[in-house]
Image: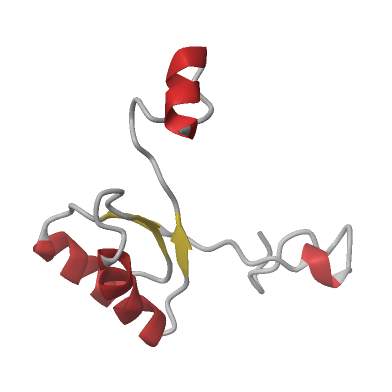
Amino acid sequence: MYPSGLVGMAHNPSPAARVKPVLAYELFAGDPKARYDWILKNATAIEYTPNPLDLDSARYQANPFLELGIPVRFHTRYPGWELGSADRLQAEEAFK
């Protein structure tokens, strides 16, 4: 990384090469309120995993970040329910 925060400028001056890395905190729907509050106060970006059984709650948990201009990347990680599982039957079940 260069002092300006730009990556790759010395070798490739194209706009696509001027990417600023961002540290995103992981936030799961079931995280304790204290963790949620700390991340809301300190994060520059979040990677949010909603509760698959209560997807409507995602907007209530994500909107405060969006209102503050904090980028939110929605992500899902459900152990045993991964589409990319090496176990074909498990992956097939996750796809349903």
Q: Residue at x 20, y 65 (%)?
A: 36
Q: Decide which of 40, 8 is in the foreground and name it.
A: 40
Q: Is residue 68 above or below residue 85?
A: below
Q: Is residue 22 left or right of residue 29?
A: right
One can see residue 82 in this view = no
| Residue occupying image coordinates x 53% and y 27% | 84
Image point 31% across, 59% down: which residue? 55
Left or right side of 63 for 31: left
For the image, the number of numbered tags is: 0
Quarter containing the N terminus: bottom right
Residue located at (37% from left, 86% from top): 67
Residue with the most extreme front position: 96
Give residue 63's quadrant in the image: bottom left
Q: Is residue 88 or residue 26 the one in the foreground?
A: 88
Position above or below: 35 against 68: above
Decide: is 50 above or below 33: above
The colour scheme is secondary structure
* Left or right position of 41 against 21: left
Residue 61 rendering spot, x and y as whole percentages: 26, 70
Is residue 65 visible in the rendered image? The answer is yes
Residue 70 drawn at (x, y percent)? 42, 77
Quarter-of-image position of residue 32:
bottom left
